[in-house]
């Protein structure tokens, strides 16, 4: 059976300020109604014999993965929580162990969560060809047929033919300079390295044990120490931390004599920058991509993305990327957007938070939006989903005032439990044990005013929590 494995890592830097560490690009709807992660899951689920997808992700993204699967009605084949990042080779090993526990002859289709594929039929045909090679023991990667000399991707040189659609891998090539990339296109036989793979799970583990036994040993120990947590599988932290951090390319594919490549032209993009998003998006006659409330005068070949909060106007500009969010705005030339990481590095060095979180932060129970912050106070707009509840908690440094805007909130404050309706309010003293719950069928919206000497999110002592965070 075919087991899709979705690798959902990422630091959220390349599409800053829209992507952040707590919401990297795979969870954003960039080119349609669904996020890139959801599009990847849906694409895999439509393949013949495809089982429920396995997702490998960071702990802080677990609820986002669960909610996005629910949003498209696709069951989970497992959500494996990496306790820390160790690159792709260990992550895929965890997934292989997971699917082999259910299917001794499992075939894995490994895909990053943040890639775009326009031609699903061409991709499906490539998967079918790769599956035939996998049954013969090959570890198959998908090589994207290049249509221009890209310097931002690694390349694969194909060797001898393996049947009608596949080839041995002659060698993997690092990202070239422009002259070298132009030569690759002129010579032919080269493909972009897509980072997608298909192989039997046991074949991958066998080759991993042969070429990177320390990774396999750590993965086995970490998976053996895994614990169930709601709908998630928490991988053993200590054992996984002992694993070398290495990509599947370096650990296995460049060393094995069983590496094969299936070339494919399927409208693929890794959406690695704002300029690459501009290149795959629908544009107007002036070469522009607008999203949100935009008024453009004499503007060409630009991407302008306005936030919900304000309009953007442009006059006489070209080749720009302008992206506005509630707390940050990026303005850059299209040929410089790869340098957005330098902005993120400066934010980190300054101890700021704009690279970590959006102003609006999603939680498993709903969301909060910090709409005003000042000395010793903060104002938040909180939305609690139907049937959801915040943890039973207390604070050491702040008190809170709650004003219900809509819905019916159930409030626990020390030994009292009561309801608050629209236009009603209550006060939560510093140190009081409290909880907010929505037992209704409609969202509860309220305004929270915090006051105190310290207002950080780490001033929370969780006593009970239905999401396992206490």
Image (spheres, rainbow, N blue to C red):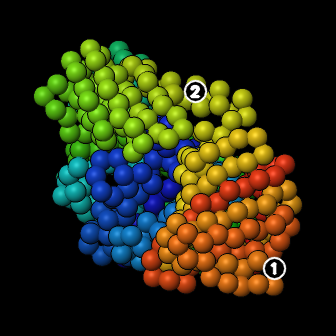
Which quarter shows the C terminus?
Answer: bottom right
User: Left or right: where does residue 346 sit relative to residue 125?
Assistant: right
Q: CA distance from mark 2 to mark 1?
A: 45 Å
Q: Is residue 263 visible?
A: no
Which numbered circle lies on residue 414?
1
Outermost residue toward the left in this view: 285
Residue position marked by numbered label 2 in the rendering: 343
First in residue order: circle 2 vs circle 1: 2
Residue 284: % across, % down:
16, 32
Q: Nearer the viewer, residue 443 or 172?
A: 443
- Which label sits in the foreground, 2 or 1? 1
Q: Quadrant of residue 348?
A: top right
User: Which residue is at the front of the view, 215 or 356?
Assistant: 356
Q: Are marks 2 and 1 in contact (CB under 8 Å)?
A: no
Count of numbered labels shown in the rendering: 2
Q: Is residue 451 left or right of residue 331?
A: right
The quarter of the picture where residue 419 lies is bottom right
Viewer-proximal residue, 12 or 450? 450
Considering the numbered disc 2 on the image, is that residue within a helix, a strand or a loop? helix
Which residue sits at x=67%, y=78%?
411
């Amino acid at each position: 059976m075919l087991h899709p494995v979705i690798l959902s890592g990422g630091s959220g830097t390349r599409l800053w300020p829209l992507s952040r560490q707590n919401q990297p690009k795979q969870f954003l709807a960039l080119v349609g109604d669904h996020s890139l992660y959801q599009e990847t899951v849906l694409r895999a689920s439509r393949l013949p014999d495809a089982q429920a997808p396995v997702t490998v992700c960071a702990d802080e993204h677990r609820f986002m993965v669960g909610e996005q699967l629910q949003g498209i009605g696709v069951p989970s084949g497992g959500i494996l929580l990496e306790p820390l990042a160790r690159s792709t080779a260990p992550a895929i090993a965890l997934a292989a162990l997971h699917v082999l526990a259910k299917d001794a002859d499992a075939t894995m289709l490994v895909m990053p969560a943040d890639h775009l594929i326009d031609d699903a039929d061409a991709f499906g045909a490539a998967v079918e060809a790769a599956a035939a090679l996998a049954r013969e023991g090959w570890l198959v990667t998908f090589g994207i047929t290049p249509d221009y000399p890209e310097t931002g991707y690694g390349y694969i040189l194909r060797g001898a033919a393996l049947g009608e659609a596949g080839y041995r891998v002659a060698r993997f090539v690092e990202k070239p300079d422009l002259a070298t990339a132009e030569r690759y296109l002129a010579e032919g036989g080269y493909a972009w390295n897509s980072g997608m793979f298909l192989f039997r799970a046991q074949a991958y583990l066998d080759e991993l044990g042969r070429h990177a036994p320390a990774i396999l040993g750590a993965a086995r120990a970490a998976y053996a120490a895994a614990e169930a947590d709601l709908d998630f599988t928490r991988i053993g932290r200590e054992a996984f931390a002992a694993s070398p951090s290495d990509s599947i390319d370096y650990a296995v594919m460049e060393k094995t004599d069983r590496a094969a490549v299936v070339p494919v032209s399927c409208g693929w993009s890794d959406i690695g920058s704002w300029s690459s998003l501009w290149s795959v998006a629908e544009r107007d006659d002036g070469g522009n991509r607008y999203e949100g409330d935009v008024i453009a005068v004499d503007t060409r070949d630009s991407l302008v993305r306005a936030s919900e909060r304000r309009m953007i106007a442009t006059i006489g500009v070209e080749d720009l990327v302008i992206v506005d969010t509630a707390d940050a705005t990026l303005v850059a030339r299209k040929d410089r957007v790869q340098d957005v990481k330098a902005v993120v590095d400066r934010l980190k060095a300054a101890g700021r938070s704009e690279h970590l979180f959006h102003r609006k932060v999603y939680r498993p129970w709903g969301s909060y939006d910090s709409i005003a912050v000042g000395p010793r106070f903060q104002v938040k707009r909180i939305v609690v989903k139907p049937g959801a509840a915040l943890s039973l908690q207390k604070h050491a440094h702040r008190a809170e005032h709650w004003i219900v805007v809509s819905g019916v909130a159930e409030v626990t404050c020390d030994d009292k439990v009561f309801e608050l309706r629209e236009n009603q309010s209550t006060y939560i003293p510093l140190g009081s044990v409290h909880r907010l719950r929505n037992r209704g069928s409609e969202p509860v919206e309220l305004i929270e005013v915090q006051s105190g000497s310290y207002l950080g999110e780490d001033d929370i002592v969780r006593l009970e929590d239905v999401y396992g965070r206490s």
